[in-house]
Amino acid sequence: MSRRIYLTASVAMLLSTTALAEDPPMCTDRPTKANNTCTVAAGFWQIESDAFSFTHYRDDGVTTDTWAVPNPTLKYGLDDKSDVELNWAPYVSVKTTDEHRLDGVGDIYLRYKRTLTEKGAAVGTAVIPYVKIPTAKRGIGNERVEGGLAVPITIALPHDLTLTLGPEIDALLDEDRNGYHVNLVNPLNLSGAVTPRLTLYGEVWMANNFEPHGTYSQYSADFAAAYSVAKTLQLDVGANFGLNRHTPDVQVYTGFSTRY
């Protein structure tokens, strides 16, 4: 009798452990511009997507409004520390004040993320090389391959706060289309859980574009909220506000993340 009880308990524990192993917590790069250091669990698929994204940009008297509906990123976990990611917007609309309008698909972004530190570490680090495949027509994209490398860093702070840095270097097409130049990006992101389901984010984002015909910088203040509906479903909303004339005045978006 005792042996039967022992076997039953052992099977129950094994099933429980297997269920936990097969259903790890979901971790996303949404919302805000900063990347997380975590990856999708091995063998799982994850979708992180804008339901819509709207950007308003006014510079030198020209106003440009851009819509992306939707803007999904599909991820697949390769192992416990790496995943592959594909981002592609199936519909992008760009309209300027002179009523010039372009509609079409966006560019494809392929990324590989590798976590360099152990789970639960006070300081986490990852590397994310990426390449852009030019599938968008000119005006929506620039019809050229571009790429770069991001190195997100997360730091656990007291009171369940997390500080995220995201240094990134990009190789972007020159304005005259005859070569490439360096673009340096770094977001400074602070996030914290208000409730077990609700997390708030505040971020300062900056980029320095070393265009040969004139270097310029971009700055934005970004705010977002994410709500965990279930263990494998998260909803979010956010807004980014440009802090100088080279940065879009405002970008608003809402989206979701889910895993299966």
Image (tube, rainbow, N blue to C red):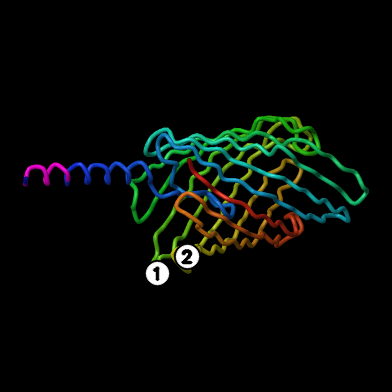
Q: Residue furthest front?
A: 1
Residue depicted at x 43% and y 38%:
114
The amino acid beneath tag 1 is His
Magenta-span inclusion, residue 6? yes
| In front of the other: 155 or 20 | 20
The numbered dot on residue 159 is: 1
Q: Residue at x 77, y 58 (%)?
A: 245
Label 2 and label 1: CA atoms lie apart by: 8 Å
Picture layout, residue 57 above or below residue 111: below
User: Furthest-right residue in view?
Assistant: 98
On screen, 231 above or below 91? below
The residues colored magenta run: 2-8
Q: Secondary structure at mark 2?
A: strand
Q: Quadrant of residue 8?
A: top left
Question: Which one is nearer the viewer's eye here, 232 or 76?
Answer: 232
For badge 2, the amino acid type reads Gly
CB atoms at circles 2 and 1 under 8 Å apart? yes
Q: Which residue is mark 2?
A: 192
Instruction: Residue 82: give x, y in percent of width and height.
Output: 42, 37
